[in-house]
Amino acid sequence: MKKNVLLSLMFIICAAGFSQEFFTEKTPGFKEYVMYAHSYDWGCGVDFVVCDAGVTINPAELKKEDFSVKVVLTDAEKTDSARGRTQGERSVLEVFPCDEYGQPLTQASRYFALKLKTVYEDEFSDLFVRSVFNSKNSIYMLRIENRKLKLKVTKLAGIVSPAAEFKIQSITKNGVTIKYASWNPPQQAIDTPLIIWFHGIAEGGDNPYLPLLGLKATALISENIQKYFPEGACVIIPQCPTGWLETVDTDMFGMRVWAPVDIGGSVNRGVDKARKFTTGLNFMDESVRNGTYEVPEDSETNTDPDKKPFAAVSYYTEVSKAMIDSYIARNPYVDTKRIYVGGCSAGGYMTMNMLIQFPDFFAAGFPVCEAYPDSKITDAQIKKLSELPLWFTHAKNDETIKIETHDGPTYERIKKAGASDLHYSLFENVIDSDGVEIDGHSSWAYVLNNQCEENGITIFEWLSKQKR
């Protein structure tokens, strides 16, 4: 998720049809290239390319200024070569002869490697090009040329990425289907904890690699985080086809309401009146809105109408819980007393949603720039949340999810309710690993880099100690 993060379906559509394969290891065939994609704080960067020139090339002939590397959006049905709309050009930092795996050589070789400039400011660094001109049938490819060597390489052999270490699966519950990526520690030791991470609004769709790489979620299996768990930690990263913010509540036309539309509560109060009116006229049967929604016991007695949890329960609640239960059943070594849930933005909303709906299931939660409106959380729900270990994270300059309407007051209410293990990392802005200021909504970078700290304890060190 890069600059100008918007709560818009446009981004979801853009990468939904991505169909390229990811590998932990791959070599190019005759006149083919292999792209290497890694997670950065701002998104997924294509930073390295290994090419088969088809002929032997001497090291002296390889000069970076002679190469042209263009980004091309190609029809997903014709992935044999980069034929399509040229979107932009990548800057070559270095070129050198190598073996088929990209290891540098000093002698002549038919293989050569290109190191590409991969920075936040260059939108074409990102494998998942977000463009209104892109479509769900277009994928990112490269056209590599060197006129002096009369060389052109356009056929992609595959993409090498840490994301390939994850297993991609899907699950259906009551007609609702989601895909998810999972990773198991190699030792599969008894009492292994489980981490669930929910992505943001821009990573939804039908491509599970997008939430893995677009939000640096692959960091969850890195040594920087796994080192705190002696037996390792299992990881599940689900993907929502639309948005976690889609709720079980419906408007007067039977359309499901999205959580952010009713931050102040006034919209749903009007919808509720209209719903009663239209139901009386037999215009809309009440069964349309039944879903899995259950009104909390105290909601009718709460004197503050803004605290009534309309438009708060995610439509994907049941299938997400089924995903977790199914995973645990298939991996009995998972410690059911050490299940942790976190997520950012819309995924932060889903984190809060799961904690509220299943307060006795999770050992701890770590919501980031969470999009769950405080006005939708009842006092009874706050009381239950106060009994859970929680660590919130946000940046003050976040223009997408406002602190004052979301985790700011929620944190204070939980604290006032008597929480004993409550933490809040609040940053002025967001600076990435290269020292560049990026979008203020991207505070998940601090979490996934394990940079949130309190009293000398980092967020994942803290998480590893939590047990229900």
Image (spheres, rainbow, N blue to C red):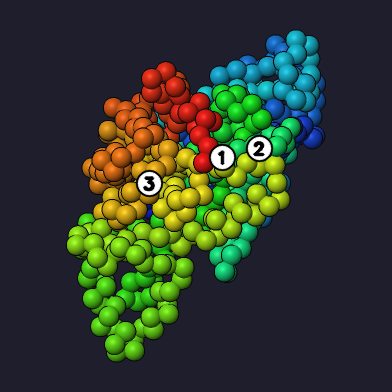
Q: Is residue 16 left or right of residue 255?
A: right
Residue drawn 48% across the image and 50% down it:
360
The dot on residue 191 is 2
> Which of the two labelled residues, at mark 3 and mark 1, occupies the earlier sequence position?
1
Residue drawn 43% across the image and 74% down it:
290
Residue drawn 34% across the image and 86% down it:
283
Circle 2/circle 1 CB separation < 8 Å: yes
- Is residue 126 at all visible to an observer of this figure? no
Q: Is residue 259 left or right of residue 331?
A: left
> Which of the two labelled residues, at mark 2 and mark 3, occupies the earlier sequence position?
2
- The local secondary structure at tag 1 comes to strand
Question: Which residue is label 3 attached to?
Answer: 385
The dot on residue 338 is 1
From the top left corner, tell me how far across and down residue 339 is, in percent: 55, 42
Q: Amino acid at mark 3?
A: Leu
> Which of the two labelled residues, at mark 2 and mark 1, occupies the earlier sequence position?
2
Label 2: how many Cα within 10 Å (few below 14, some 14–19, many 20+): some
